Every structure is written in C-alpha cells, then in structure tokens.
Image: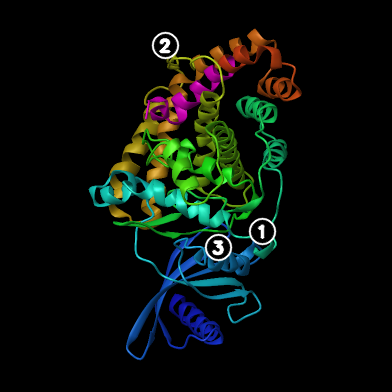
Amino acid sequence: MASTATDDLAERLERLLTAHGVDGTVVDLQRLSGGASRETWSFAVVAAAARRPMILQWLRSGTVSGGPGMPGEAALIRAAAARSVPVPTVVADDDGSGALGAPTIVMDRLEGETIARKLLRDDDWASARGVLVGQAGAALAGIHRIPVEDAPAMRDADQLEEMRSLLALVDVPVPAFELGVRWLAAHRPPDTRRAVVHGDFRLGNLLVGTDGLRGVLDWELAHIGDPAEDLGWFCVRAWRFGSPLPAGGLGSREELLGAYEAAGGDCVDVASLRWWEVLGTLKWGLICIVQSQGHLSGASRSVELATIGRRTCENEWDLLALLPGGSLPDAAAPTPARVSDLYGRPTAVELAEAVREWVDGDVRTVTEGRVAFHARVAVNALQMIERELTLGPGHAAAHAAGLAELGCADEADLAQHIGSGAFDEGADRVRQVVARSVRAKLEVANPRWLLPD
C-alpha cells in the first residue's frame, strides 16, 4: 500500500514538473519529515542519463498558514536569489489547483548540514563557523532589500501586540512574560522602515557547507516588519545550543550588526537589537506553550509536544536575565520530599527511574529515526518526573512564600497584577520573586540551563 501511494505521488509530481517545463522520471522518492503543517520529501528527476536532486514540500490538507503560502514563498525565494541571497533554486510551485492537489513548492536540493549542534561543535564545520556571522548578516541585508511592493501579500502586524494577544489567548498565567510585555511596551525603539522579514532566521533553518552558508531555508513565517526583528531572533539564546557567543552561537552582536550594515543593511544599534532579542525570547516561550497545548487538547498527542511545554521556563529565565535589575537568584538548598511509607518500595521516584533506565538502555539502542528521537524525549520527561517528585514539596513551599510576600493568591493573581501595571513601581522586587519561581521550574525541567554558557 505504501509503495502504491508513493508511486501515485511520483506520477502526480511528474505532471506538476512537466507543467513547469521539467521533463523526466521521478525516482528515489523518500519522505524526510512530517511536521504539523507540511511534509517534506526528497527525490531525483532522471532525464537523458542526467540526475537532478530535488526537494518537495507540500501543505497538509486543512492547514491554515499565517505566512505567504507556497507560491508566496516561491516568489520570495526568487526575489532573494535576485539579491544574491544564497537560496535553493525554485523549480515549481502551485497553489493547490495543480497535479498534487495541495499548495506545493519544488526546489533543487542543496548539499549541506542544518543540525545546529553539529555546526557549532564538530571539527568538520570549523571553517564555516569563522565566516557564518558575516554571511548571515549579508543574507539578512539582501532579504531586507526585497521591495515590499514586489513581495506577495503578507501580514504586517505589530509584533508586540501579537505577543500580548497570544499571551492572553494561551490562558496560562506566566508572570515572567507579563514582566517582559510591560518592559517591551515601555522601551519600544523608534519605528524604522517596513521590510520583508524572514521570520525564522536561525541555525536549523540555514543550510551550511564546509565553506559556509549555502542556503536560507523555511520561509513559511515570512511577513512584513521591522528588519531588526530577524537580527534579534538570530540572537535568542535558544538558538545558541550552549555556545556563549550571542549571535547564533557563532559570534558577537557587534559582528552581526557590522556585517549587516556593511552589506547594505540599515544601522541598528545594540539597544534596539536587545529589544528584539527580548521579544524573540518571549515569542519562543509562547510558542512552547502553544505546541504543548496541541498535545493537552488532544489535537496532536505527542510526547515531544508534551515535553516542550516544560521548555517554557527556559525562556522565562532568559527573559528575566535580559531585563534590567540585579543578578538572578541562586538556588536555595533543596528540600527532598519525605518518602511515604504508605506505598512502600520502590517509591514513585524509583519506579520512574527504572522506566527511564529501560527506555534509555533498551528502547533507544534498538530503534532509529523518529522512534529513537522520541525515546530520548521520553527519557528527558522521566527525568523531569523524578526531579519534580523529589524537589516539588520544597519548591511549592517556597513559591507560596513568594506569593505571600507580594500579597498574591496564586500565579494567575500575580500575572494579573503585573499585567495591569500594579507592580510597576516595585518591578525589581517582583522580578526577584518571579525569578525564584522560574528557577525552581528549571531545576526540574532542565537544570543545565542554569549553568553559564
């Protein structure tokens, strides 16, 4: 059955390509990934003994895209190429009315690596690391030179207002994010020109060869906005993967801004960049919540989506660190939970530990691909459970004391007070109380995030 479905896709793909002037036989059709909104396939077109590797992306049925859509992405990629931005060559695109019956884009396949941890650590990419900041700055300058009037219809919304609305929509009280919104509203940089913004420019969406940047990928979040947004997003800590270097884990903020300006980009000062870095940190934290709610609602049950919800606190901590004020609090001495003699041994912690050891030692060694990846995610989730069972009672007592210090009943009450501006005068004190709670979350979710990069 799978072979039949693949053969049918290959035939329809051949018809699409023929309609765009590319004749040949589709071979080696393999699915690479299947995200929530789109599928990605690799294949080759063979004609007259010549082999041309390509990539197919198509939108899942019923998906509502907030970006420019597949034909819009194709138009942007072509416009970027005309401004010397390294991108794959677009071979074909379709709005869903063609042979595949879904919005589609086909591009030539470029060779390279996208996995950020490899790019930042492996010796094979040492030469690339030395030039990537400059190349990233130049690529962004080229993207931002695409005339807005020549770009496909795209949303042009105030990013801070979008984050404020999203924070209200997720209906999860996050006091740290409320502090972030208050600071962003009070320190908004002057308006600059509107430009085409990539929207997700970071390691992971950049294809890199040993000589450096070969292709800017994944344009589905492109929109009209402030060019500094892309620069700030590139500097969000989540995309550094443990590197101490703030610009994508590759260099300094000043290097990035210098390369951007040297390539024709607008002058962006460090203060404006910091504002967009704060907003990007807030944005990624909210995305973590939204993704986890996909699991919690039952719309897409997934151990990966469930676990990513606990990554929200990484962004809470990073946002608090970016806001002005004193040093964030160190850890208090943990108070391990008292072991109840009601249930006997093994305890809940010991049971979770036993399951984790089995998944880590047996399941991961005999699986590969997505199953192996999800096994690794499950190990992380079980470690969280162990730490929460151990540290939870002490954390809960400290959290209650912090809320009482501010006269708040619970997290929702604290978030409401911050969002209303009631705590603006005592923001530093509030930041410290919130940071103690966020630190407790990190001690359970990911203690390594508390270590310096």
Image: 350 above or below 124: above
Q: Is residue 451 left or right of residue 138?
A: left
Image: 425 above or below 199: above
- Between the C-alphas of marks 2 and 3, the distance is 46 Å
What coloring was used for the rendering?
A: rainbow
Q: Main secondary structure of the magenta part?
A: helix
Identify which amino acid the numbered label 3 is placed on. Answer: Arg
Question: SS class of the residue under badge 2?
Answer: loop
Is residue 408 among the parts visible in the rendering?
Answer: no
Q: Residue at x 60, y 26 (%)?
A: 176
Q: Is residue 163 left or right of residue 396?
A: right
Instruction: Read off the magenta span.
Output: 433-453
Quadrant of residue 178 within the rendered picture: top right
Residue beneath disc 3: 38
Identify which amino acid the numbered label 2 is placed on. Answer: Ala
Question: SS class of the residue under badge 1?
Answer: helix
Q: Residue at x 66, y 56 (%)?
A: 66
* Tag 1–tag 2 contact (CB < 8 Å): no
Camera-side residue of 35 and 66: 66
Q: Quadrant of the C terminus?
A: top left
Identify which amino acid the numbered label 1 is placed on. Answer: Val
- Between the C-alphas of marks 3 and 1, the distance is 26 Å
Of the image marks 3 and 1, the number of the one nearer the N terminus: 3
